[in-house]
């Protein structure tokens, strides 16, 4: 291995990835409480004690002014994955494959995290690879002369890339030059300016000066030298380049997606910006801008900086064949761009670094830092040896990397194809969710990256065991601990994860919804067997079965239920489930037949919609569009029947989700949608698939456009209200009483109404590429207790300080999860077509049907989204004061830590003055029942976790109490409030149980 590839550099690389606590206004690096610059990992900077209250450079204050340049977890994981991937040896047997057959498996607990990481890693690695090649091209271009033009750089980078095997053999010279020209121009307007080649000091970029030009006299009169005049003007023009106002070579289209999210062409004029027309203003439209701020700091308080800036504009636009090139645009008039042919590139220029914001520069005017509002001074500097990106660009091996996600969002056939491509070496990195843990042999694999700490030791063993399965291969497993409670506790004691105890799997048999699906499987197996034996009929696709007479034949087969089917159900189902499903009466069969009819209606409507659009496309002579709609119909009708039944909740499937709904994507403009099955349990889908929400799947960004509605079917709707005083939940009709029956308070919350989106959701037909940061799911809303269930077991615990806790636990507690949107006001949903939106400034008069895309004038109503379900539940009542959500979330973290329960499998709420813990798995998995039996261990673990966090006691962080699901309560969570109660509960002992 080379020095760079030495895996001891992984820690240094990770630290460099977090050089990103930046001011949202001026981009300056933040400072921690001790005054050290923010070059330490965010693990220490993201606490309340160390995050600066304001920007030291520009004075901006408030948490909103401090941001991370990149998404921390994604950036850190990408740095680790890139470094690890570069360190892997090539596979001689797959030398002709991408990356020389290198393979890396990356695991994530979250399906969305795994889906986003694949395109993010591929994009970030491609950026690093291109920058390495451009740096080599610059070295060659400046081998004879000290400087090079943009055209010189493009030519030499093409040669370097060709030698590295980046291009296909059949790519023409023009194609290669066009591709490299895109890279170079993207680099010259890079958004990540601190990590770009120019930002780390490897590229020097300046504007050439014609010897015949004379500097403007007014600047000379202000005391600037001729050289300083040109440097000042060059810095002012450079601000335009950094904003994307740069001309392009003929072969580069400024509207190319490589320039996302700032596609061009972008122009500038003297005064008056117009964002919609992509026109910037040289002078600030209002307030200040970077040019005026910089000029004011260079010239001092006595100068009229705005007048000088205006004079600079007149001088630059009057230069014959100067830095700014003019053009006329309709509706705008004369505008300008920076002429890229005047740019001069150099390597190895002396570096300057701001003592405050740490920005790198290659030129200085009176030592003033060009960062907006930064008061620091530029000082001579030497390259930093521990700068990860600087080292990476210089030493990276230009091997390609192809990454794909492998999650349950793909159809089974597509997932199998991706897996085989990985085994053959055609895919280098698989970003996987938990679906890849069991029973998967991916052949020769030397390394695995765990992007978060697995929930349990069993998960860790399964994921780590993917590598090193061959006797002659050594395996490396790298685990990245995110800043959250579970990860940090295992990071502090890694042996508890690596060598911990593996619990025997436990599956409760009394889940009626899972039992119902097994009853369906028994009945349908008997039906398919009888159909083949009697008539030779075999259904393989959803279209054959549902668009034919399949559902009707099932109804006839089960009327009445054959005795052998009833006997089979008696043998496999628990007695309690038999009674609940109505095995003896045959009631379950009617439910199955009705369910099949609903699925038939859904498929028939989808097919009819696309047939209608196909016909319209033919009439418009759009044969390409008509062919696409025909392929979509084929996709819908030719899906595997068994898979379609499982996806529509008829048959059991992996993970046994009990109420899954789909985000429909087959109608969208990306052909990837036909190969996806975006289904989630309804309790999660009301957040992740809610109108306006975004998800990543198949390397594409999908946005939910509304709810799917069936003709002749209405969504279930109820009124509900939550007491502001005790959080007691009630639902019913609009006649709900004003006073709370639990506490008698008149401070009742508003009366709202919800829909149950049981038919699923529809994606917007327009798709996009994933952005730099992953789409954020807004968990606006809460889960409320409808009833505690039946057959509750009671137990009393007493602490050493005589504090008492009463526990009531049992199964079949009734909960309702309610999603109320980002602002808590719900979603605007159409009564006719299901179109939906959130966070709208005003109610639109019209909207488009999310499937047909035709205008719709249906009535829009504000509604929440809800899903009711039964699960295991635990109610805790205390005789100690100051009970709060802080105590609730501390106990949940303690349960996850002390009992090795996946934190995503349990949650809690407050209701009627009590804390209620529940299993998030519909039907229950017995997790909170274990909490009731081991409350002493849960409290001890909660005290350790919350007491050892390094954030301020008056607040909280993701290392102790915060999670993404409780973000609406973050401002209420306090470590001190939790510890005050928990310490009174230490030394618990169980007194009685009944």
Image (cartoon, grey):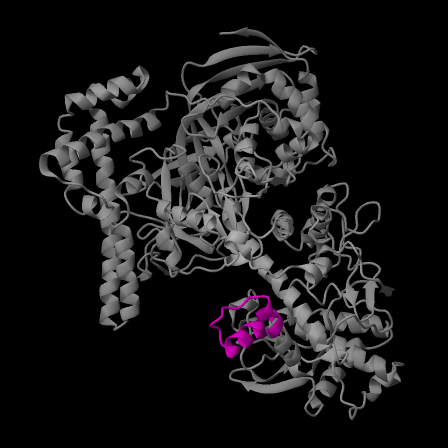
In the shown orientation, is residue 632 left or right of residue 14? left
Direction right: furthest residue: 223
Residue 955: where, in percent of width, then height?
70, 36
Residue 537: where, in percent of width, then height?
14, 40
Q: Is residue 724 visible?
A: no
Q: Main secondary structure of the magenta part?
A: helix
* 280 is higher (above) or lower (below) than 573: below
Q: Please tell me which residue lies in front, 279 or 235.
A: 235
Q: Identify the residue at horizontal 30%, vertical 15% (top origin).
A: 575
Point out the stretch of residues depicted in magenta. 159-183
Q: Please tell me which residue lies in front, 842 or 943.
A: 943
Q: Please tell me which residue lies in front, 298 or 324.
A: 324
Q: Identify the residue at horizontal 55%, vertical 31% (top origin).
A: 461
Q: Identify the residue at horizontal 46%, vertical 47% (top origin).
A: 423
User: Is 164 in the magenta?
Assistant: yes
In the shown orientation, is residue 125 left or right of residue 291? left
Q: Toward which corner of the image does residue 899 lie, by quadrant?
A: top right
Q: Toward which corner of the image does residue 659 lie, by quadrant?
A: top left
In the shown orientation, is residue 406 left or right of residue 652? right
Q: Is residue 106 visible?
A: yes
Q: How many marks?
A: 0
Residue 777: where, in percent of width, then height?
52, 46
Q: Identify the residue at horizontal 55%, vertical 36% (top origin).
A: 471
User: Is 212 in the magenta?
Assistant: no
* 415 is higher (above) or lower (below) than 788: below
């Amino acid at each position: 291995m080379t020095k760079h590839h030495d895996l001891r550099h992984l820690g240094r690389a990770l630290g460099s990835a977090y050089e990103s606590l930046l001011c949202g206004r001026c981009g300056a690096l933040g400072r921690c409480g001790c005054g050290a610059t923010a070059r330490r990992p965010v693990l220490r900077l993201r606490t309340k004690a160390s995050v600066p209250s304001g920007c030291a450079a520009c004075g901006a204050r408030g948490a909103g002014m401090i941001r991370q340049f990149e998404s921390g977890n994604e950036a850190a994981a990408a740095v680790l994955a890139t470094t690890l991937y570069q360190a892997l040896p090539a596979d001689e047997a797959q030398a002709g494959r991408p990356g020389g057959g290198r393979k890396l498996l990356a695991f994530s607990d979250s399906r969305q995290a795994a889906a986003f990481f694949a395109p993010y890693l591929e994009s970030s690695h491609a950026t690093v690879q291109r920058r390495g090649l451009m740096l080599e091209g610059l070295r060659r271009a400046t081998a004879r002369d000290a400087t090079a033009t943009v055209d010189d750089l493009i030519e030499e980078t093409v040669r370097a890339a060709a030698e590295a095997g980046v291009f296909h053999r059949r790519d023409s010279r023009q194609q290669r030059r066009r591709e490299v020209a895109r890279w170079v121009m993207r680099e010259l307007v890079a958004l990540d300016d601190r990590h770009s080649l120019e930002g780390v000091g490897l590229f020097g970029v300046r504007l050439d000066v014609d010897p015949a030009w004379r500097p403007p006299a007014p600047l000379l009169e202000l005391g600037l030298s001729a050289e300083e005049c040109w440097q000042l003007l060059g810095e002012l023009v450079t601000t335009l380049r950094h904003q994307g106002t740069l001309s392009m070579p003929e072969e580069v289209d400024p509207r190319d997606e490589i320039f996302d999210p700032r596609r061009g062409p972008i122009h500038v004029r003297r005064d008056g910006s117009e964002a919609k027309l992509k026109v910037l203003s040289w002078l600030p439209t209002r307030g200040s801008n970077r040019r005026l701020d910089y000029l004011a700091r260079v010239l001092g308080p006595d100068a009229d900086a705005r007048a000088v800036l205006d004079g600079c504009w007149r001088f630059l636009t009057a230069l014959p064949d100067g830095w700014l090139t003019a053009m006329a645009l309709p509706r705008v008039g004369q505008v300008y761009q920076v002429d890229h042919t005047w740019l001069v590139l150099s390597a190895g220029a002396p570096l300057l670094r701001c003592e405050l914001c740490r920005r790198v520069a290659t030129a200085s005017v009176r030592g003033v830092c060009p960062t907006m509002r930064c008061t620091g001074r530029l000082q001579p500097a030497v390259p930093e040896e521990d700068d990860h990106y600087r080292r990476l660009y210089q030493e990276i091996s230009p091997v390609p990397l192809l990454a794909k996600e492998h999650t349950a969002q793909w159809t089974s056939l597509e997932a199998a194809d991706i897996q085989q491509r990985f085994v053959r070496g055609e895919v280098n990195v698989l970003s996987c969710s938990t679906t890849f843990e069991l029973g998967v042999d991916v052949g020769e694999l030397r390394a695995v990256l765990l992007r978060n700490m697995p929930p349990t030791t069993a998960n860790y063993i399964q994921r780590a065991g993917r590598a090193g399965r061959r006797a002659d291969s050594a395996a490396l497993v790298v685990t990245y601990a995110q800043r959250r409670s579970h990860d940090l506790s295992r990071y502090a004691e890694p042996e508890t994860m690596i060598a911990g105890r593996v619990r025997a799997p436990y599956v409760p048999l009394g889940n009626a919804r899972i039992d119902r699906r097994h009853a369906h499987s028994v009945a349908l197996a008997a039906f398919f067997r009888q159909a083949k034996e009697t008539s030779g009929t075999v259904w393989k696709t959803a279209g054959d079965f549902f668009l034919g007479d399949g559902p009707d034949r099932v109804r006839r087969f089960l009327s009445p239920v054959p005795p052998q089917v009833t006997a089979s159900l008696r043998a496999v189902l628990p007695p309690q489930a038999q009674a609940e499903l109505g095995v003896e009466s045959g009631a379950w069969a009617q439910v199955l037949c009705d369910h099949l009819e609903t699925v038939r209606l859904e498929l028939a409507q989808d097919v009819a919609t696309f047939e209608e659009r196909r016909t319209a496309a033919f009439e418009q002579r759009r044969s390409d569009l008509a062919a696409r709609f025909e392929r979509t119909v084929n996709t819908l009708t030719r899906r595997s029947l068994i898979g379609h039944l499982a996806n529509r909740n008829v048959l059991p499937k992996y993970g046994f989700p009990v109420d899954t709904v789909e985000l429909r994507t087959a109608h969208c403009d990306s052909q990837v949608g036909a190969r996806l099955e975006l289904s989630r349990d309804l309790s999660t889908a009301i957040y992740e698939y809610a109108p306006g929400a975004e998800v990543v799947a198949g390397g594409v960004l999908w946005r939910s456009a509304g709810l799917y509605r069936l003709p002749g079917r209405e969504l279930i709707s109820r009124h509900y209200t939550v007491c502001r005083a005790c959080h007691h939940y009630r639902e019913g009709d609009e006649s709900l009483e004003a006073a709370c029956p639990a506490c008698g308070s008149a401070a009742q919350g508003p009366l709202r109404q919800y829909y149950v989106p049981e038919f699923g959701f529809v994606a917007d037909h327009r798709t996009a590429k994933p952005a730099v940061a992953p789409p954020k799911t807004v968990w606006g809303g809460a889960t409320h207790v409808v009833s505690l269930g039946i057959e509750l077991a009671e137990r009393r615990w007493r602490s050493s300080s005589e504090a008492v806790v009463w526990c009531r636990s049992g199964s079949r507690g009734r909960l309702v999860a309610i999603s109320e949107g980002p602002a808590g006001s719900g979603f605007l949903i159409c009564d006719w077509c299901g179109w939906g939106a959130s966070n709208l400034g005003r109610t639109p008069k019209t909207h488009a049907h999310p499937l047909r895309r035709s205008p719709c004038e249906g009535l829009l109503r504000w509604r929440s989204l809800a899903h009711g379900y039964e699960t295991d539940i635990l109610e805790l009542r205390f005789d100690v004061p100051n009970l709060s959500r802080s105590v609730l979330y501390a106990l949940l973290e303690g349960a996850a830590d002390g009992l090795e329960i996946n934190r995503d499998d349990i949650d809690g709420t407050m209701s009627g003055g009590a804390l209620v813990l529940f299993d998030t798995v519909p039907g229950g998995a017995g997790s909170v029942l274990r909490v009731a039996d081991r409350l002493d261990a849960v409290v001890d673990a909660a005290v350790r976790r919350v007491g050892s966090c390094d954030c301020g006691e008056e607040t909280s962080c993701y290392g102790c109490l915060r999670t993404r699901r409780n973000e609406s309560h973050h401002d209420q969570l306090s470590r001190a409030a939790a510890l005050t109660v928990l310490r009174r509960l230490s030394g618990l002992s169980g007194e009685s149980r009944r």
